[in-house]
Image (cartoon, coloured by chain):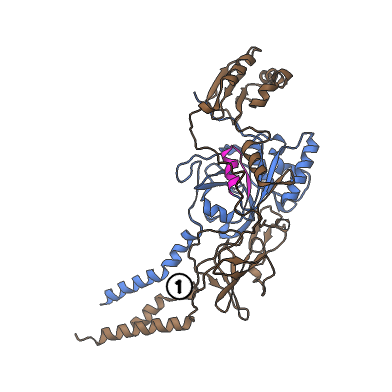
Amino acid sequence: MFWVRLAIAVVIFILSNWPLMRVRSQEFGKAVVGGKTSPEGTEIHVDLPGEYHRHNVSSRGSGCCVFTSIGHSARWQDVPVLIDFQTWIQSKGLPGGGYPGNVKDRITKICREKGVPEPPYLQVEGDDLDILKLACASGRMPAVTYSYSPTGRYGGRRIAHMVSLPHIDSSYAAVLDNNYPGIDKYEWLDVDTFRKVYRPGWAVILLSHGPPPVPRN
Amino acid sequence: MKSAIFLLCLLIPPIASAQWGAPLSAPVGAPGIRRPVIRPIILPRVGAFEWREYGPGHQIDLWKDGRQIGAYDPASGVYRPLLDWKTSKWGEPCEPPVDVPEDFKFKATATAKVDKIENFGLDLSKLTPAATPRYLLGGKEIDWREAYEFVEKGLPDDRNKLRFTVIGTEAERKPVWDAWLAAENADLRDKMLPWFVAADHWSVKDLGFAPGHPAIYTQSPDGKVLGRAEEYKPEVWGAIRKAVADYDSRRDPPLLPPLLPKKPDEPKPDDKKPLQPSPSPALPEIPLPLILLGGAAVLIILLRRNSNAPA
């Protein structure tokens, strides 16, 4: 009789806690840390070599994630004036902390200083994912805001961050987080989850083209 | 009796965490998201009002008298009243009728730590989420159709341009670059995207590009080699011009799905319309002590029946 009661107790315990056990997987869908292929086996759109992944830095007490992410895009799309954007910010003693207005001002300033024309770029405010898909599919790598890591980085805390988006299609998005650089450290999220963490919804897209495709006959 | 107490203890973890309640409502500003069923954490009441939290990254809902009346997004500091949950009608952003709990208040500062939000470089005081998407080209606002065209085609239009790649030392590339910029090759510049790099550049190294002094490639947009030279001679421009003239993108066998279809004439679904969140449906409120009492009573009855059964 004892064993029967114990079995009933275990079943009741599991059933009563089942919703809690399922919460984490339901909350943000599928998200994994991995390499250059999605969980479905799709190859990443933008394959920036690992040696060019930069770690975020700070300038005058504020992070430079925005300028680091733009630097990644500049490296991929051959915009030399912005490749070392984060270093320039530090060298000028400018505070980190980016927003659309100061990105525009600082691009103007760095180009004027280096005597080159301003590269064409687009800033998108809002949660339009289609334009991000278009950017990646056409060989560009947007810089996007990021409010939470569903794989548990940052101890589950909310964050205010900008990262690079080397891939997004109808199923998955990949995040190159400049606090976790490396070709084996892409965070792959299903698109619904990415939509939830793409907050407050701001992207910077350099418009110049990326490198040529791999040659084939 | 001991068994009843034992079984009751097993139910304490889910009850104590107050994980009861309505399904999660979608975040403010994101309509139509599939809503997972998450039990909210009910925060201490403020008079007749009650805030409900669904975990990090989600909005918090404001309830009153058993019904949701609004939602607040901690990431943006936006509160919207829920005017009619049956029709998902939400009001314009406004001040909530009761204070937002301190832990969830939006903190407008660019310092490294913003209470519960760790900041790695966004100036949140200057970043207000757009109710409808905005597109800025070099700081100037443009229409979404123009924005899509710019991303798809690049500036200038590069969607169907051929690739012109020159790989070699700087001395080897220079005469080719100078000729590329010459006036007589303006027609090629309109049709091709240049890429002049050293042989050890990450974009060409170990990717199948054959060596040369310099190596000169013309490729279709998908990578097919239309012509290659292993050194530079002025005659190469005639061959390049012929490869460009002979190329017709309509003959390319499709390797990949096409880029997203353009919809320049279709209105964007959310054009000029604020993004609407979805409400949580109201469920009947049963006081917790009553649930505990009912459960305990059922257990005791079952166990007493069992112990009174004839052997």
Say which chain tag 1 marks. B
**Quadrant of the image occupied by residue A8:** bottom left
Q: For the N terminus of chain B, which image quadrant?
A: bottom left
Q: Colour of chain B?
A: brown
Residue B216 against residue B49 in the figure, above or below:
above
Can residue B207 be seen in the rendering of this structure? no
- Is B217 positioned to the left or the right of B2 in the image? right
Residue A108 against residue B156 in the figure, above or below:
below
Residue B146 against residue B52 in the figure, above or below:
above
Give residue B248's position: percent from left, percent from top.
55, 24
**Quadrant of the image occupied by residue B232:** top right
Residue A140: in magenta span? yes
Q: For the C terminus of chain B, which image quadrant?
A: bottom left
Disc 1 secondary structure class: helix
The residues colored magenta run A129-145
- Is B220 positioned to the left or the right of A23 in the image? right
Q: Residue at x 66, y 12 (%)?
A: B234
Give residue B210's position: percent from left, percent from top.
54, 21
Give whichever of A97, B261 is nearer the camera.
B261
Q: Which chain is blue?
A: A
Give residue B109's position: percent from left, percent from top.
72, 60
**Quadrant of the image occupied by residue B44:** bottom right
Q: Residue at x 56, y 37 (%)?
A: A47
Residue B182: in magenta span? no
Give whichever of A153, B62 is nearer the camera.
B62
The amino acid sitting under disc 1 is Pro
Q: Residue furthest front?
A: B265
Can residue B67 be seen in the rendering of this structure? yes
Q: On the image, numbered disc 1 is attached to which residue? A: B14
Give residue B83's position: percent from left, percent from top.
61, 70
